[in-house]
Image (tube, grey):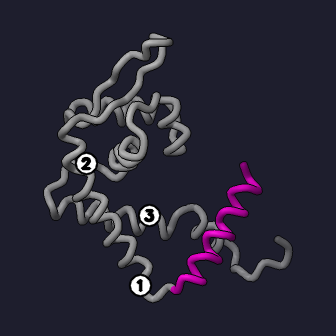
Amino acid sequence: MSGNQFKRGELYSFITGLASTAIARRLQKNFKQHDIDITIEQWSVLYHLWKQDGLSQQELCSATFRDKPSITRLVDNLEKLQLVKRVASHTDRRINLIYLTDKAALLRDQTMDMANRTLNEALTGVTADEIAVCKSVLQRVYDNLK
């Protein structure tokens, strides 16, 4: 993008997560206020399992854009909280599939509601057209770099 209109660092700090960090911090605060004892990183793993239970750790890496050691640590901690369980794959015992527990299912509606309220708060005053442009630009940035 030649002749970009941003001061050096403005665009980079936004793209690297200024808005994302603010939303994550607010959501974490909302979880804490409602006595939900999970981190945003743990919630992101649960979120993908709520969409499709029984993903492998490698699939969770791809879905959450995290590396293997990070996912292993997150799954370990979610297991300690009794929110997930590892089950060896029937077709390849080297692969662990991650399944939600009943306790995790109980968190789904409450945390998703908080996430939706937090996102609505973050998008106050932002029009649907502005959101569409933002999504388009960020998708193009992502596509250019993948």
The three-letter code of the residue at mark 3 reads Thr
What percent of the width, then of the height, locates residue 84?
A: 28, 33
Residue occupying image coordinates x 70% and y 74%: 8
Residue under circle 3? 21
Nearer to us of marks 2 and 3 is 2
Q: Residue at position x 72%, y 48% from top?
A: 146
- The residue that mark 2 highlights is 38
Q: Which residue is mark 1?
A: 124
Question: Could you say which quadrant of the image residue 129 lies in?
Answer: bottom right
Viewer can see residue 41: no
Q: Is residue 98 visible?
A: yes
| Highlighted range, magenta | 127-146
Which residue, as the protein is rendered here, is positioned at the far bottom?
Answer: 125
Which one is nearer the viewer's eye here, 12 or 91? 91
Which amino acid type is shown beneath numbered disc 2?
Ile
Q: Is residue 55 above or below residue 42?
A: above
Q: Nearer the viewer, mark 1 or mark 2?
A: 1
The image's mark for residue 26 is none
* Amino acid type for the residue under numbered disc 1: Thr
What's the residue at 35%, 32% (across, down)? Answer: 75
Q: Earlier in the sequence, mark 1 or mark 3?
A: 3
User: Answer yes or no: do the residues labelled 1 and 2 have beta carbons within 8 Å?
Assistant: no
Instruction: Count how many numbered circles sit on residues in the image.
Output: 3
Which is closer to the viewer, label 1 or label 3? 1
